[in-house]
Amino acid sequence: MNIRTWILVIINTLIFTVVITISFSFYSLFESTLDDKVLSQLSSIERLKRIQVEDYIQREWENFKKVPVSSASDSIFLSKLPTPIKNNGVYDFTEFSHDGKLLIGLVFVQDDSTYIKLLNDTFIQNVLLERTGMGSSGETYLVGSDFRLRSASRFFPEEAPYSIISETESVKNAFENKIEKGIYKDYRNIEVYSAYHLIEFPNFKFVILSEIDAKEVAIPLKSMQKKLIIIAISILIIALFLGNYLAQFISTPLNKMKKEILEMTDGNYKPVRYKKSSFKEIDEVLKALTELKVSLSSAISFSKDVGNMNLDSNYKPKSNNDILGHSLIKMQEKLIEYQNKINFANTQRKRNLIEGQETERKRLSQELHDGIGPLLTSLRFYVESLNIDAKQKNDAKEIIDQTIAEIRRMVYDLMPPTLIDFGVAATLQTFVNLIKKSTHIDIEFDNGIKENNSKIDDTISISVFRICQELINNTIKHSKATKIRISITEFDELLSVFYFDNGLGYNLEKVETGSGLINIKERVEILNGAIHFTPEKKHATVEFEIPLTYA
Amino acid sequence: MPSIKIIVVDDHKLFRDGLTALIDKHEDLDVIASLEDGVKLFEALIDNNPDIVLLDLSMPNMNGFDVLKKLKKEFKTIKAIAISMHDDGNYIARCAKLGAQGYLLKNTDEQELTTAIREVYEGNKYFSQEISTKMIDSLSETNSIKKFTKKETEIIKLLAKGFTTKEIATKLYVSTRTVETHRSNMLKKLKVKNTVELINKAKSLDLI
């Protein structure tokens, strides 16, 4: 069951229950109030008419008592009665009425003569038919103790009242003097609101009933019911829409979250901007989701960096529980360690290569110098001491001298002996002097190496000399420079070399592979130094520093 | 006329023999010993008193430079002539500094060799034209102000004139970092905290 449906069901059930309960109680309250009103009205009408009827009869009787006179027709009626009347009083003669209508007789016995006055139904009927406040179906009528109607029925005006039998519960109640107004079935067997009362005369009893059809009374109830149903349905519909509207505040962000989380399962961790929700909790959940995504994204981008061996990338674990982050950092550390090992091994390899090369050059240089050199000079002495033609002797000496010169050149190229015996400054100075003499370049070397306690060892000397030699050779070969300045300065902890020429400059990226620049860089690298090129035209500089703590 | 007593010191026997043979041809020259290194030389000097030592520079036990130093200190009367394969001015200059009276290349002519020996014996110095030139080439200027190095003096002068570090670096063909390091070294040397104090104190000490 989704949340939307659930919210709708809950809201509507609640509202439905409330509406139904209120409607019912309202309806019943209205109904009972209406019942009371109708019955009390009926009862007051009944009382009014009862009093009028009783008064009328009483009044007629009083008048008749004062002047008892019988009319002829009345006397005939009296004589036709099956049983003679012996006592004074009012009698109900309706059963003897020729048209079945109410017939009240006043009988006065005086000195053996009996006087009678018949009262026809006209007055009483008028009183009863007076229908003020009785609606369209209300009537007031009289019933005799024989359960026959005494007054005309409104519904059967043509029929003789006496022929209509009304042996209803209300009438019975009235005769038993049980006065309970309420809803009963009348003589037509139709439900009516009924107020009734007994009218007692010494010789007979009537029941007066004021009634109105339940149907008529129910008309406002029915319309009320209709209205209530319309209102209830309206409320329910509104509730449905409102619930739907409200549910979206929860279900929309929830669905959004569901979508996002599903996307995350598919590997999309891009953070999304959410519309601000009206609810604090939802906002917080969305914020937490965004944070989760951001943190995952940063972990992912970090792992990407690590994967690309971009090991300078930084990542801060979100907490101690950030296992992913911690493992990534651990991975990075391992990779850095591994890379450092490789770098170290690489540098070591290069160092071994270059140092091996230099050692070999030094060895060869010394072999030539100390091995071949003395042999040649000895040979020269030998030739000198030969007793041969002077010209031949000179030619031979000339050849030997040239050989020695050649050996010296080779020795110098392999490894200038001064580099070991006098260090880089003296060697470089000699080299610079040589350049100065053999070219037109204005070249100066500024020596800032400590004269005492210099920390520059042979390895550094050789490298610095080779680098400077390479730089000078490059300048001469490619740059058309007219000025070269070299400055070497020894500080307590580092050796700084600055090289300047005013040549054409060069493009580091293009020149790199062919020239000796790689070699230069490697030499600096294996001494744990740093080198920086600014190959500008007219002002090309190279500066590098070598730490002297390097053992 | 007594002959000039000579000791030859070189680790190559063949060379020593050649040289000895060459010298011995001359009546006035007498090689009294032919030794292979400095240690042997000083052993020999206990019993011998040569006039001249012909000294090779590169030797396994106690090289030429060390021998020159010791001779200068302990045997002032013995004159040394370096005879070496090295034609670099640095070697020549150092020998001269350490008291060698002459410098010969090993492929020297007999003529030059004997001239050098005789000149030195007479109390002169012998450095051929070629050798002298090389020696002078290699001599570096070394007179610096007591407290500051040459470079530092240059830098502080420029600082005093109001140049920036960058300008000084460009002017002196050094890196800006070098200028910075020099500057901070000077601050340390004079125990001052900033450049203004540095210049003032340097002026008061007559360093600039």
Image (cartoon, coloured by chain):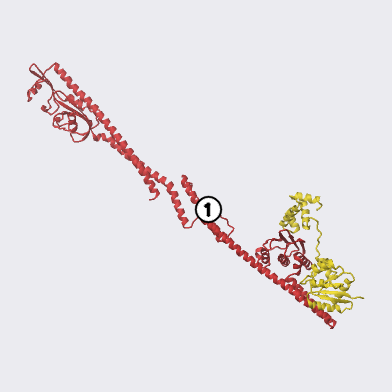
Chain colours: A red, B yellow
Q: Is residue A126 visible?
A: yes
Q: Which of the 4 quarters of the picture holds residue A473? A: bottom right
Dot 1 alpha-carbon crowd within 10 angstroms: few under 14, some 14 to 19, many 20 or more: few
Q: Is residue A153 visible?
A: no
Q: Which of the 4 quarters of the picture holds residue A192? A: top left
The percent coordinates of residue A266 (x first, y second) are: 47, 58
Compared to residue A461, the image places residue A17 above or below, namely above
B41 vs A83, left or right, is: right
> What residue is shown with label 1?
A320
Compared to residue A181, the image places residue B185 above or below, namely below
A223 vs B162, left or right, is: left
A327 vs A6, left or right, is: right
Q: What residue sits 24% from the left and 26% below the top?
A: A44
Q: Which of B156 and A238 lies nearest the eye of the viewer?
A: B156
Q: What residue sits 55% from the left and 57% below the top?
A: A329
The percent coordinates of residue B189 (x first, y second) are: 76, 53
Q: Which of A250 and B84 lies nearest the eye of the viewer?
A: B84
| Mark 1: secondary structure | loop
Q: What residue sits 84% from the left and 74% below the top?
A: B7
Q: Residue furthest right?
A: B1
Q: Which of A503 and A261 lies nearest the eye of the viewer?
A: A261
Compared to residue A298, the image places residue A12 above or below, namely above
Chain containing mark 1: A
Q: Which of the 4 quarters of the picture holds residue A509? A: bottom right
A409 vs A341, left or right, is: right
Residue type marked 1: Asn
The percent coordinates of residue A324 (x first, y second) are: 51, 56
Compared to residue A185, the image places residue B82 above or below, namely below
Locate the N terminus of chain B by quadrant. Answer: bottom right
The percent coordinates of residue B11 (x first, y second) are: 78, 74
